[in-house]
Amino acid sequence: MKKIIKSSLPILIVIMSAFIIRLVVMKELGVQYNLVSDDYYYVQSGIEFKETGKITIYGTESAQIMPGMPWLISIFVFIFGKGKMLWIALKLFWISMGCLSIYAVYKTMNIYANKIISAMVCLLFCVPDFAWMDNLILTETPFMLGSAFLVYNSIMLANTKKNKYYIGIVAWYMFTLMFRPTIALYPLFLFAFLLAKKYDIKLLLKQAVIAGLVLIAFVIPWSIRNYNLYKNFIPLTYGTGNPKLLGTYQGYGYPKDEDLDYIKNVDEKLPPNVKKYSEAKITKENMHLNGYATLEKDNYKAKYRMKVWWQTDKKSMIKSYCIHKPRILIYNTFYWKQVLNVKTNSILLIRKIELILCAILGIAFLIMRKRVKEILFIGALYIYQIAVYSYTFAFDRYGQTLIFYRYIFIAWMLGEIYLLIKERLLKKKETKKMLNQ
């Protein structure tokens, strides 16, 4: 045990520091602190699930969210009840998940960088915006935890081909999917990465089929439940309509509402069931159908706005979706309330320094061409998720969970530079020794 602690001391110090910072933030904010937004309603959905077995959000049955949050929170409701103890338990669990994410990222870094470099880069998780995020009962913390372990197990599977990492991928993929559907296409990136790493194709296909069957069995009950409620095939969620619509108001040059004919191009083109649900008088029995129809209508409205935007001003639309919105996700911070007397500008300065370091190390990567397959893998995952969120509504909250991909890149490249310097110093030392002889 002493040997393990000694070898892991750098990261243990970082994790303990991160844990203490998060506890101090919890004390400063109060254990029942929430945004009176999604975080509050997630807790209410967990209470509702424990009491009725129904997946709800905003007080009505829904498939707008994945079932992960209600399921997980309901366990705490069962044990701790609905009062202050529930909030204390949830906050401590969320803080623990945040710290476990640091460990998962560290383990991934440590594959190609030494312990000191990996732990030093992980100090970036001690910045207050992460501590504040882990004090909110939102999907960000468990999603980042699952994503980090997915990457770790994927790279270890490619390197070792051990079954435990294959099982880890399947388990963490299902865990992550239960919180956000944006991870759904992860297997495609993994498949390409394993092929690039010369993974045995027969074994890969066999494992892919098994994982696919497990996933189908895992998702089918949720899909059946959604069909029974909405008489429509909804394998994951139906909630993208509203963020897609909000995304058409980001950037510049987007169409003005007063210049558009929504009645002719949206209302009159709605499918019969959506039109029926949206126009029906709202009752307790059909509230979930009205909510579904509202978001579906938002989806049609978003498509109409995007079509008009493309036809009238392609340049501004391309700049908005490819520059303005990605910038929000890449540079901003999810930090809506100042804690520990640390201002937002200070965090953004750290973010700017980290991005500049990424750019410098990116040049080093192009010169050195080290860990090409691995870096392209995490780079593709990062860009894919930036693109998904940019297509809908770019939100600093979503970008916060993706920053760890950059941290992994920084650690790996610093590790390669360290090895290069070490190798050259060693050669210089050997040459000097030979000349002296």
Image (cartoon, rainbow, N blue to C red):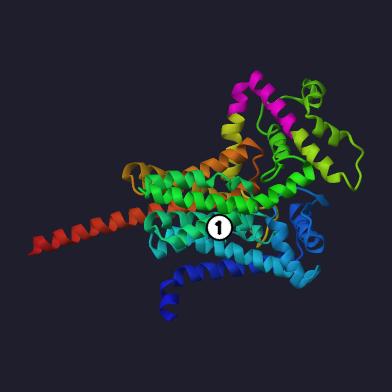
Which is more toward the observer, 381 or 362?
381
Answer with left or right where residue 246 lies relative to residue 200. right
**Residue positioned most to the bottom:** 2
> Measured along the vertical axis of the image, is residue 180 above or below residue 306?
below
**Magenta region, residue range:** 299-318
Q: Is residue 306 magenta?
A: yes
Image spot of residue 196 (x, y percent)? 38, 44
Q: Which residue is mark 1?
A: 172
Q: Amino acid at mark 1?
A: Trp
Answer with left or right where residue 38 lies relative to residue 349. right
Specify the quadrant that holds the C terminus.
bottom left
Which is more toward the observer, 275 or 256?
275
Q: Secondary structure at mark 1?
A: helix
- The number of callouts visible is 1
Residue at left offset 60%, top offset 70%:
20
Image spot of residue 429 (x, y percent)? 19, 61
**Residue positioned most to the left:** 437
**Residue positioned most to the top:** 312
Image spot of residue 232 (x, y percent)? 74, 39
Dominant SS type (magenta)? helix
Residue at left offset 71%, top offset 32%:
249
> Measured along the vertical axis of the image, is residue 86 above or below residue 414?
below
Q: Is residue 159 magenta?
A: no
> Measured along the vertical axis of the image, is residue 68 above or below residue 232?
below
Q: Name the image quarter holding residue 95.
A: bottom right
